[in-house]
Image (tube, rainbow, N blue to C red):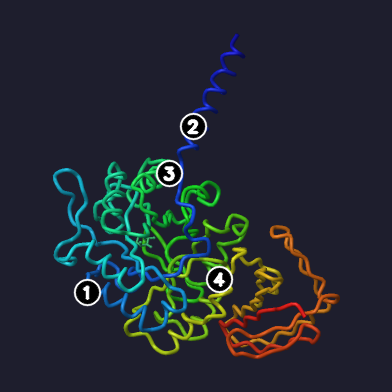
């Protein structure tokens, strides 16, 4: 009798969950390749206003970033004013006097898309109104403004269940009816890679980035991380990434104070790891060197490859690491990373190496199969039939694109 009762409860629960999942949807035709864009936080923090956002859209076009594939202009925290008497969120009228709809119209007129930021808790990380209890209202408001992207943060959430909080906002966006990319930002605290594939289009895997190579920056109750600590936190996550659902290594710090080699390495690593590439510098005043890094078409093509496979760490020699990303048509991207504070020489005799990727089921015997290669950053050319000899500056990368011979 008790057994029967338990069975009945189990069957009922299962049917409920099927019913729940049948309604649960995210917009599917978004971020089939990692999203490319810009976000205000890394440079401007709370100091955002409509004029600056318009200028950033202009700069995305005039710099050639739009032509290179970047499409989102994302306003992070602090655009919010108060809720009105019916609970609808309003913009901060002092800094966004024309309103969000007008700003979205402007960004759209440039052929770009507009992103916005909210939080699953009562307040955002900077203390503005969060979406808790207002999810459906907020999604409707964003849709009416013409928003294309929602980054959804995790401050002030106390006892909220992350899976249901993010699913609620996903459902609210879907119900609102306007396709919006849903970017989950809970810093990897609740392993979103295990449950968010049908919830968001990307999920942050770590705490916030900081513009340094290997530092961890202590803010008291939390830390932010440099390029290498964020890279190292991706261990074990590549199997969860794919078209429509990416491991997000956070917005980039290219052009925000690191050396040119470090910036190039940072960009190349984020690209090969199939992370969203969201610039975080001031596009209006960036140097030629920064622009050249952000608009490197060959590196962007590796990130945007249709197979959507995140790179694997192939060889680990301590200071030198080699990452490989399988690409369309039998190509491979191979990235050599020098983590060290000094320059390093490194030689690779391909003939003695074998590559096996259990996740993408790729396998190469380099003694049998030969490739030509092209150096993505300096244009050099070669073949895997010959030994590769590299001299790598401190904190730098070499990236080769291999094509079957
Ligand atoms: C958190 C996020 C950041 C940024 C700030 C805004 O720290 O991780 O990316 O959005 O909040 O307050």
Using the image, tell me which numbered label, if any, was put on residue 167.
Answer: 3
Coordinates of residue 190 in the picture (x, y in percent):
48, 48
Q: Residue at x 47, y 78 (%)?
A: 68
Relative side of 140 to 162, left or right: left
Mark before the other along the chain sequence, 3 or 4: 3
Q: Nearer the viewer, residue 39 or 126?
A: 39
How far apart, in angstroms, are the residues tagged by discs 2 and 1? 46 Å
Instruction: State which quarter of the image contains the N terminus.
Output: top right
Coordinates of residue 29 in the picture (x, y in percent):
48, 56
Q: Element at badge 4? A: helix
Q: Which residue is mark 2?
A: 19
Near mark 4 (Cα within 10 A), the count class, few <14, some 14-19 or many ≥20, is many
How far apart, in angstroms, are the residues tagged by discs 3 and 4? 27 Å
Q: Residue at x 45, y 38 (%)?
A: 23
Kindly give the residue lying farthest to the top in the view shown.
1
Residue mark closest to the camera, 2 vs 1: 2
Q: Which residue is mark 1?
A: 51
Asked if residue 236 is positioned above or below residue 171 in the image, the reply reads: below
Q: Element at badge 2? A: helix
Q: Element at badge 3? A: helix
How far apart, in angstroms, are the residues tagged by discs 1 and 4? 31 Å
Mark before the other along the chain sequence, 1 or 3: 1
Asked if residue 44 is positioned above or below residue 291 in the image, the reply reads: above
Q: Nearer the viewer, residue 179 or 240?
A: 179
How far apart, in angstroms, are the residues tagged by discs 2 and 3? 14 Å
Mark 1 touching mark 3, by CB under 8 A? Answer: no
């Amino acid at each position: 009798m008790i057994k029967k009762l338990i069975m009945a409860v189990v069957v009922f629960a299962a049917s409920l969950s099927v019913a729940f999942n049948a309604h649960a949807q995210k917009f599917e035709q978004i971020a089939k390749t990692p999203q490319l864009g810009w976000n205000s936080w890394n440079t401007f923090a709370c100091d955002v206003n409509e004029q600056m956002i318009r200028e950033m859209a202009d700069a995305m076009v005039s710099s050639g970033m739009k032509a290179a594939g970047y499409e989102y202009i994302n306003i992070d925290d602090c655009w919010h004013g108060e809720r009105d008497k019916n609970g609808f969120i309003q913009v901060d009228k002092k800094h966004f006097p024309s309103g969000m709809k007008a700003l979205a119209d402007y960004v759209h007129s440039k052929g770009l898309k507009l992103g916005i930021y909210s939080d699953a808790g009562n307040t955002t990380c900077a203390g503005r109104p969060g979406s808790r209890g207002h999810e459906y209202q907020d999604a409707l408001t964003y849709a009416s403004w013409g928003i294309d992207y929602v980054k959804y943060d995790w401050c002030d959430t106390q006892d909220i269940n992350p899976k249901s909080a993010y699913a609620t906002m996903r459902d609210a966006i879907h119900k609102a009816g306007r396709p919006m990319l849903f970017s989950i930002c809970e810093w990897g605290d609740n392993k979103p890679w295990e449950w968010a594939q049908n919830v968001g289009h990307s999920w942050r895997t770590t705490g916030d980035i900081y513009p340094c190579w290997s530092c961890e920056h202590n803010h008291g109750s939390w830390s932010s991380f440099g390029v290498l600590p964020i890279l190292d936190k991706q261990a074990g996550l590549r199997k969860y990434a794919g078209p429509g659902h990416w491991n997000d290594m956070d917005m980039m710090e290219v052009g925000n104070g690191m050396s040119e080699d470090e910036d190039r390495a940072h960009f190349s690593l984020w690209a090969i790891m199939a992370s969203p590439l969201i610039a975080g510098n001031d596009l209006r005043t960036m140097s030629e060197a920064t622009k050249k890094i952000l608009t490197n078409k060959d590196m962007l093509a590796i990130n945007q490859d249709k197979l959507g496979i995140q790179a694997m760490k192939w060889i680990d020699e301590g200071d030198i690491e080699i990452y490989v990303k399988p690409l369309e048509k039998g190509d491979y991207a191979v990235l050599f990373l020098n983590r060290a504070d000094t320059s390093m020489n490194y030689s690779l005799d391909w003939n003695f190496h074998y590559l096996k990727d259990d996740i993408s089921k790729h396998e190469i015997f380099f003694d049998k199969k030969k490739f030509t290669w092209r150096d993505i950053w300096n244009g050099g050319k070669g073949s895997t039939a010959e030994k590769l000899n590299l001299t790598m500056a401190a904190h730098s990368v070499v990236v080769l694109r291999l094509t079957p011979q």
